[in-house]
Image (spheres, grey):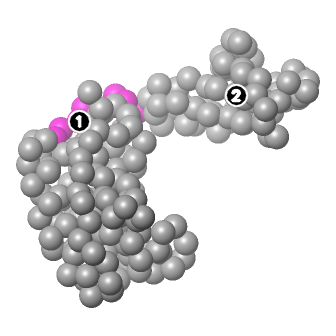
């Protein structure tokens, strides 16, 4: 159900959905649209107070998304090239992980809207987003090392990042660069 509020002259139009949830949840999509979910028992006034309390954050995120979405994306690789590059990087990364008891995984590719890669440790599968074609080589290398590191540490704990640091010391800079690429916009 569509709702509207004003905050410092800015219209906050959001979609409200009642669900079986414990908390009021707020999501802002890449197009700037706002979604709020809450339990049926939560009074409308409490939801409005919640949304207004998040207004500075909402406006900042919407502004960030708008600036990202206005950037012209230039591919660093063709889709065919990025597959070859990732396979080469997997071959380069593997010996380190093989020495740690990791078997060579199945490598898959697909377009994804919310992540650059994924690791299915139980099945031994690494999947990479073909939209990495928009990322510089160092960032692609970071994603490969990141996903391989999940075979050693299945979560994003301090231990995971300590392992990642050993093979990719510049991971923080690469992650920042990847965050500047509007992932959802790249999917076609």
How crowded is the residue under tag 2: few (<14 C-alpha within 10 Å), some, or many (20+)?
A: many
Residue occupying image coordinates x 29% and y 34%: 186
Report x, y in % for residue 176. 39, 57
Residue occupying image coordinates x 71% and y 12%: 1
Residue occupying image coordinates x 40% and y 47%: 115
Report x, y in % for residue 80. 9, 44
Pick the front one: 68 or 98? 98
Q: Is residue 58 visible?
A: yes
How far is mark 1 from mark 2, CA to CA? 31 Å
Q: Is residue 175 visible?
A: no
**Secondary element at image label 1:** loop
Which residue, given by chain and number where applicable, does mark 1 sit on?
A: 73
Pick the front one: 15 or 121? 121
Report x, y in % for residue 143. 31, 60
- Residue 141 picture quarter: bottom left
Image vertical order of residue 63 relative to residue 180, above or below: above
Image vertical order of residue 58 relative to residue 160, above or below: above
73 drawn magenta:
yes
Q: Earlier in the sequence, mark 1 or mark 2?
A: 2
Q: Where residue 184 is drawn, which disc sits there? A: none
Which residue, given by chain and number where applicable, does mark 2 sit on?
A: 36
């Amino acid at each position: 159900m569509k709702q509207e509020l004003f905050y410092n002259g800015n219209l906050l139009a959001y979609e409200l959905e009642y669900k079986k949830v414990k908390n009021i949840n707020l999501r802002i999509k890449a197009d700037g649209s706002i979604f709020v979910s809450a339990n049926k028992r939560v009074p409308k006034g409490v939801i409005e107070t919640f949304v207004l309390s998040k207004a500075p954050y909402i406006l900042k995120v919407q502004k960030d998304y708008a600036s990202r979405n206005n950037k012209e994306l230039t591919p660093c690789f063709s889709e065919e090239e990025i597959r070859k590059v990732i396979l080469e990087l997997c071959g380069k990364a593997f010996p380190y992980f093989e020495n740690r008891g990791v078997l060579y995984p199945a490598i898959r590719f697909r377009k994804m809207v919310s992540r650059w890669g994924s690791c299915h440790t139980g099945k031994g599968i690494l999947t990479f987003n073909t939209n990495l074609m928009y990322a510089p080589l160092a960032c692609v290398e970071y994603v490969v090392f990141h996903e391989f590191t999940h075979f050693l540490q299945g979560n994003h704990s301090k231990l995971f990042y300590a392992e990642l640091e050993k093979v990719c010391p510049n991971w923080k800079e690469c992650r920042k660069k990847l965050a500047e690429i509007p992932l959802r916009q790249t999917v076609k």
